[in-house]
């Protein structure tokens, strides 16, 4: 899932940002980010039968790293050993999050999986915050997750799919929490475009870390031009475009505003799931999504 970077205090726009993008309202950029993120996930679901969900996710990371490295050429920047280690850990957490999340959406509806995964950032906000809103957000989010999980357990999905899906998505939520903690340092690095450079380094490290598990698929993917093109589309839609747009948004809005915008993602995922994958949510599922989105807004209100 997701897949959004950590809020940092607003600062000057990245030198890498085109001037035209600076004129686009931040919420509009965030909508594009969310739509491309989950549109890429919807395309990826169609490839699961060919390669398997974890392998598709690994290729998404590999190809996104290639695109970002070719674009940013981060080796031109002076890096300390500490910066490289933090970026590497950040990329490893990001890669792990994406892999287990893809396993989750291979077994659960996209909107449900995204909502449950949001318990990760909500937990971080509640633990690091001090206000009653942030503490109460955990209760509200837990109610939404219980409702979503209960609907899923009582639905038409096989019990084995539900168990594997829930475990995978909860693991993705834990990875997202780690990604947030490490992402604060990467996204807040000094210098124009430093956050995107750190993202490029991190994704390259994450791809290498998991290569021993999925690298054997190279012989199957590279000769198949159509399959490689689809994987590249997934990488661009789900990693390159949303992560870069997040960097641009983070430099223009405050922490609370960005957190409120995050509440749009579960709804965005539900719309994409309904339109592209025909995963129409029931009324109890919609209620669960509303509770999770409300918890995100509560954490933002606490940080105001």
Image (cartoon, rainbow, N blue to C red):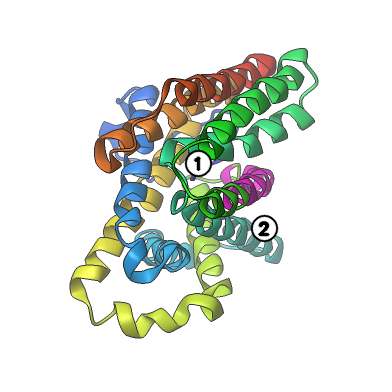
- Who is closer to the viewer here, 273 or 21? 273
Write the residue at 39% across / 79% down: 217
Task: Kindly indicate the quadrant of the structure image that contains residue 22.
Answer: top left
Q: Position of residue 20 (x, y in %)?
A: 25, 32
Number of the label disc, if any, that sits on residue 297: none
Write the residue at 53% across / 35% down: 154
Is residue 186 a member of the stretch shown in magenta?
yes
Write the residue at 61% across / 21% down: 295
| Crowd tier of the residue under label 1, counting other residues whose Cα lies within 10 Å: few below 14, some 14–19, many 20 or above | many
Q: Position of residue 181 (x, y in %)?
A: 69, 44
Q: Position of residue 50 (x, y in %)?
A: 32, 69
- Mark nearest the camera among 2 and 1 is 1
Q: Is residue 163 above or below residue 123?
A: below
Q: Is residue 55 above or below residue 191?
A: below
- Residue 73 appears in the rendering: no
Number of the label disc, if any, that sits on residue 113: 1
Q: Answer with left or right where residue 217 lies relative to residue 118.
A: left
Q: Which residues are magenta?
A: 168-187
Write the residue at 35% across / 29% down: 31
Identify the element where label 1 is drawn: helix
- Between the residue at mark 2 and the residue at mark 1, the CA separation in whole angstroms equals 28 Å
Image quadrant containing the C terminus:
top right
Number of the label disc, if any, that sits on residue 86: 2
């Amino acid at each position: 899932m997701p897949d959004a970077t950590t809020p940092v205090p607003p600062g000057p726009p990245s030198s890498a940002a085109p001037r035209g993008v600076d004129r686009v309202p931040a919420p509009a950029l965030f909508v594009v980010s969310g739509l491309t993120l989950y549109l890429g996930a919807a395309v990826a679901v169609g490839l699961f039968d060919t390669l398997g969900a974890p392998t598709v996710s690994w290729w998404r990371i590999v190809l996104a790293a290639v695109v970002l490295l070719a674009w940013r050429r981060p080796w031109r920047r002076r890096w300390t050993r500490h910066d490289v280690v933090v970026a590497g850990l950040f990329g490893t957490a990001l890669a792990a999050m994406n892999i287990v999340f893809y396993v989750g959406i291979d077994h659960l509806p996209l909107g449900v999986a995204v909502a449950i995964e949001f318990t990760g950032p909500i937990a971080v906000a509640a633990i690091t915050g001090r206000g009653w809103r942030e503490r109460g957000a955990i209760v509200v989010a837990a109610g939404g997750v219980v409702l979503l999980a209960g609907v899923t357990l009582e639905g038409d999905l096989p019990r084995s799919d539900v168990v594997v899906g829930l475990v995978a998505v909860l693991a993705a939520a834990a990875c997202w929490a780690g990604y947030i903690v490490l992402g604060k340092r990467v996204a807040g690095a000094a210098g124009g475009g430093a956050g995107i450079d750190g993202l490029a380094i991190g994704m390259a490290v994450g791809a290498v870390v998991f290569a021993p598990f999925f690298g054997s698929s190279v012989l199957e993917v590279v000769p198949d031009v159509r399959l490689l093109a689809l994987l590249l589309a997934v990488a661009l839609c789900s990693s390159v475009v949303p992560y870069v747009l997040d960097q641009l948004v983070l430099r223009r809005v405050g922490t609370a505003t960005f957190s409120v915008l995050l509440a749009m993602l579960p709804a965005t995922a539900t719309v994409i799931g309904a339109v592209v994958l025909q995963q129409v949510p029931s009324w109890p599922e919609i209620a669960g999504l509303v509770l999770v989105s409300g918890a995100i807004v509560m954490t933002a209100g606490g940080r105001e």
